[in-house]
Image (spheres, rainbow, N blue to C red):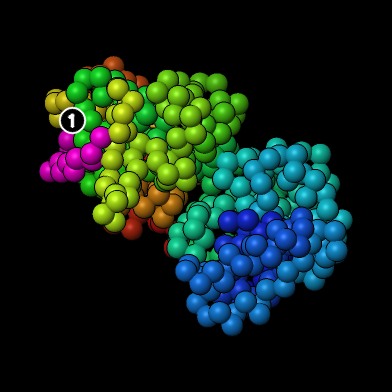
Amino acid sequence: MNNNIKSIAVIGSGTMGSGIAALAADKDCKVLLLDISAEAVKKGKDRIVNERNPMLSNPEKIKNIEIGTFENDFHKIADYDWICEAVVEKVDIKKDIFSKIEKYRSDSSFVSSNTSGITLKDITAGMPERLLKDICITHFFNPVKIMKLCELIPGEQTSVNVIREISNFLSTVMEKGVVHGKDTVNFIGNRIGCYFMLKGLHEGKAARSSGFSIEQIDALLSKPMGLPPTGLYGLIDLIGLDVMHSVGKNLELNLPKNDVGLAFVKLPQDETAMFSNNQLGRKTGGGFYRVKKLETGEKLKETFNLNNKEWQAFKKVTIEKNLSVILEDSTEGKLAWNIMGATLLYAADLIPQIADNIFNIDRAMRWGFAWQKGPFEMLDDIGPSLVIDKCLEEGVKVPKMLQVLNESNNAKFYNNDQYLDITGIYKNIDS
């Protein structure tokens, strides 16, 4: 397919906007980067060419980027094929930006919002039909240069051609892994990933009271599960408790009323106290972990003891287990079942709500959260029939896709290059 997108106007030059602009410029696209002031957009441009962490493969490619302000240069978006909004995650501000975009853009342009969890229907409520047919969500994961995933979300009236053209551009020019999702809160990756984290914090409280340390919990919820070495608490330190607090509020307002995740949207008491004390994670110098520089120049990693609220020396823990621990009748098995097992069951109950098929969910978790395997691939490794038996033993409702698999009389979700559809029939995986 020929690429019909040659130029991009990026509205907002913060972390995500500058990242998107830099990637496009690196691929030799014509880029317009706009922000509210000359100071703001200059800061965004400086971020792109930062000597310690440059976003461009060749510094000369900064020439592909023209910068400007909303007041003086917004009209220039008329000359760009794709207008990508990447401003702050506030609906009212985004709506105001899209009103300006609609005023100046050309008839042939494509439009998208880069948001990590706000639905397109909320952003575009009351907008004209001309915009509704040309707009979608392109959710890049941070850092844009490194993360493979970009979730592509249409609205109810989005043209098929818009999705086809942007998907082609993202995959062939920007070299992203495109995942197709639905216009639901947090889309795919963050819907499942945030459930894992928030459920994990609540289960972690009970685990710590029964003798588990933070280091042990992270050791279990990392390599043995096929997850990154950050585990649970280390991942939240990376993201920030402030972000998790905001995510929880968004989920509380927008999750379906019968969603099991509603029970975990508020931070537990200990984490709420940390949030109130601005102990948010790496961005504030420490959260559950911190690295302390000694007078000798050496660095000491410490762990925050949530029981006595004191810092103590980090203790490295190695757990030689694999995914099958989820089925074990042991303290580690029960914790893995209550967090990782619950996350797999949650994912298995979200089709067709957040995506039409299992491989888009699996790709989202592999490409966006660096899981070695997606939820349905994990279930295949554990043994879906064994997971169903475990659900029945624990009195847990068997989720939809496990029911579909069971009723289809098939043993696995994947069969070579095919996946099990919600109808119980194997279909070819889209390339």
The residue at the point 57 percent across, 36 percent down is 185
Q: Mark 1 points at which residue?
A: 332
Answer whether residue 228 is visible to the viewer in this image.
no
The residue at the point 14 percent across, 26 percent down is 330
Question: Quarter of the image holding residue 399?
Answer: top left
Q: Residues within 10 Å of mark 1 (few under 14, many from 20)?
A: many
x then y, percent, for residue 60 = 59, 82
x then y, percent, for residue 200 = 35, 31
Quadrant holding the C terminus? bottom left
Magenta stretch holds residue 233: no
Q: Give the range drawn in magenta.
A: 312-325
x then y, percent, for residue 30 = 68, 75
Quadrant holding the N terminus? bottom right
| Residue farthest to the bottom, as pictured | 60
The residue at the point 55 percent across, 21 percent down is 257
Magenta stretch holds residue 321: yes
Q: Is the magenta stretch mostly helix, strand or loop?
A: loop
Question: Quarter of the image holding residue 203?
Answer: top left
The residue at the point 58 percent across, 68 percent down is 48
Nearer the observer, 340 or 183: 340
Q: Tell me if 427 is positioned left or right of 317 in this view.
A: right
Element class at badge 1: helix
- For badge 1, the amino acid type reads Glu
